[in-house]
Amino acid sequence: MGWALITGASSGLGACFATALAQRGKPVILVARRRKELDVVARKCRAFNVQAKVVELDITRHDAVAKLKLATNSVFVDFLVNNAGRGMPGDFGEQPESELRSLIELNCTSHVLITNYFVRQMKQRRCGIIINVSSVVGIVPSPYEAVYGSTKAFNKQFGDSLALELRKYSITVLNLLPAFTRTGFLAAEKRSKDRIPLIQGDDPDKIVRIALADLGRRRNTGPLLVRLTALGNRFLPQFVIDFFAFRAMKAFTRR
């Protein structure tokens, strides 16, 4: 049986993907920087009588792909979840170059290089699944999260393009576009639900269930808010989209 590899697997959507796939009998490889949290997720996965490997790794390292190659040299990875990522709210002109580079390397470069390696195996076996975790801000303007939103737009475009290119190899590619989700992401960015009192956030397990249910059925998926946003992009004037995007992001980043 092929294995699933999940980046950013120590918490949030990554941890939910890991346990959901383990529950379905899929052995998992958990990749993240925090070993203690990874071990906790691995124990939950093993409770479903499947194997769970832990790879403590910063995927932005220049040798990250080489380390993943060593960690997976005895298994076939046929299910890849590109989940690792972070945001960086603030005024764009005040954000330091080093932080901007780090954000882009994590949210974009690492996904591309990791996918490039594992796609080679999938093409040889003519099977595989890739899930790219994008975001609702990848399809609408995201002021005060300009770079984060742009990286998520990149993730979506990357997935859309791969879906067309790889379908002849029977490789399924799905873009998952969550909206406001109750994960550690908000805490990491020093946000709280009182900034957007009308939006409590979706349960991450629910978002994962949506993704797994839509595999092979849709190229892009997400909760109801995202589907309504995508519909609005098609039919609403740009000034209406801009108005709501600006108000939401201003509240989200407490501007």
Image (spheres, rainbow, N blue to C red):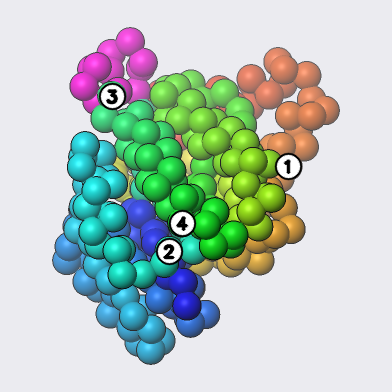
- Disc 2 or disc 1, which is closer to the eye? 2
Q: Which residues are magenta?
A: 90-100
Q: Residues within 10 Å of mark 3 (few under 14, many from 20)?
A: few
Q: Secondary structure at mark 2?
A: strand
Q: Secondary structure at mark 4?
A: helix
Residue shown at the point (48%, 26%) measured from the top left: 150
Q: Is residue 15 visible?
A: yes
Q: Secondary structure at mark 3?
A: helix
Q: CA distance from mark 4 to mark 1?
A: 37 Å
Indicate which disc residue 46 carries: none
Q: CA distance from mark 3 to mark 1?
A: 32 Å
Mark 1 or mark 2, which is nearer the start of the sequence?
2
Q: Are marks 3 and 1 in contact (CB under 8 Å)?
A: no
Residue 113 occupies quadrant = top left
Residue shown at the point (62%, 36%) measured from the top left: 161
Mark 1 or mark 3, which is nearer the start of the sequence?
3
Which amino acid type is shown beneath numbered disc 1?
Answer: Leu
Q: CA distance from mark 2 to mark 1?
A: 34 Å
| Residue at mark 3 | 101
| Residue at mark 2 | 77
| Residue at mark 1 | 228
Q: Residues within 10 Å of mark 4 (few under 14, many from 20)?
A: some
Q: Are marks 2 and 4 in contact (CB under 8 Å)?
A: yes
Viewer-side residue, 228 vs 45: 45
Q: CA distance from mark 2 to mark 4?
A: 8 Å
Residue shown at the point (31%, 75%) measured from the top left: 52
Q: Position of residue 76 (x, y in %)?
A: 41, 67
Q: Residue furthest top?
A: 93
Q: Are marks 2 and 3 in contact (CB under 8 Å)?
A: no
